[in-house]
Amino acid sequence: MKAQIVSDQELIRKYLSGNQASLEKLISRHKNRVYAYILMLVKDKQLADDIFQDTFIKVINTLRSGSYKEEGKFIQWVMRIAHNLIIDYFRKSKRIPVVDNKNEDFNIFDTIKFTDESVEDRMVSEQIHKDVRNLIDLLPKEQKEVLVMRHYAGMSFKDIAEQTDVSINTALGRMRYALINLRKLISEKNIVLTTA
């Protein structure tokens, strides 16, 4: 006799009716996939353990509060929660300066930005981007194409070569000449491309 597999939705319904074992079955069913996904992205076992735990705490709290909406598969919802927690972690970790206690000359206040970018800084930054775009427009078509594909689309030289139907050396050469010509244009037009 074949055992019938209880659906995720049925386990959720039973859990909300007070059956704690249903939640354990639900977590047990999906824990390996969720944990493997988190570990693959963060590449740190301890951090993966923390995010995994936070993911299921959020799942449980959402289920208990009654705000879980069945809009697709339960596992996709759990994976989305895990993904968002990973993104939150990376956002926060980029803001926190790493302090090396061994260096006596290190001053934490040198790494902290005390104010947000001012309106003036933002305007200068926007003007620099506008100036660069205008300079790129002055480049020969082939050089402009390679530069845009490389720096704005993030393509590899191999992909650029295939896309433009040239050799990798030709793509590299065009990029080199694009940069040389940009430097000449910056010098000729006396354009300043720094905020300081």
Image: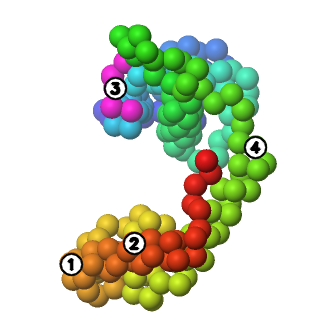
Between disc 4 and disc 1, whose residue precedes?
4
Task: State how far apart marks 4 and 1 are (Cα).
Answer: 43 Å
Snapshot quadrant of residue 163: bottom left
Q: Name the secondary structure under disc 1.
A: helix
Q: Position of residue 135 (x, y in %)?
A: 55, 77
Crowd band around label 2 with a 10 angstrom C-alpha radius: few (<14), some (14–19), many (20+)? some
Give the residue drawn at x 41%, y 10%: 104
| Mark carried by residue 169 | 1
Which amino acid lies under the numbered mark 3 shown in the image of this protein? Asp
The residue carrying pointer 3 sits among few (fewer than 14), some (14 to 19) or many (20 or more) residues within 10 Å by Cα, namely few
Q: Residue at position x 54%, y 27% from top?
A: 111
Residue drawn at (21%, 78%) of the image: 169
* Residue 153 visible in image: no
- As measured in the structure, the alpha-carbon distance from the residue carrying label 1 to the one carrying label 2 is 15 Å
Which residue is tagged 4? 118
* Mark 3 vs mark 4, CA separation in Å: 37 Å
> Which one is earlier in the sequence, the residue at label 1 or at label 2?
1
CA gap, disc 4 and disc 2: 30 Å
In the rendered structure, which disc, 3 or 4, sits on the residue that comes first in sequence? 3
The residue singled out by tag 3 in the image is 44
Query: Magenta stretch?
Result: 42-46
Quick check: marks 4 and 1 in contact, CB under 8 Å? no
Specify the amino acid type for callout 4. Ser
Residue 173, how many percent across, how many down?
Answer: 27, 78
Q: Nearer the viewer, mark 4 or mark 1?
A: 4
**Which quadrant: the N terminus?**
top left
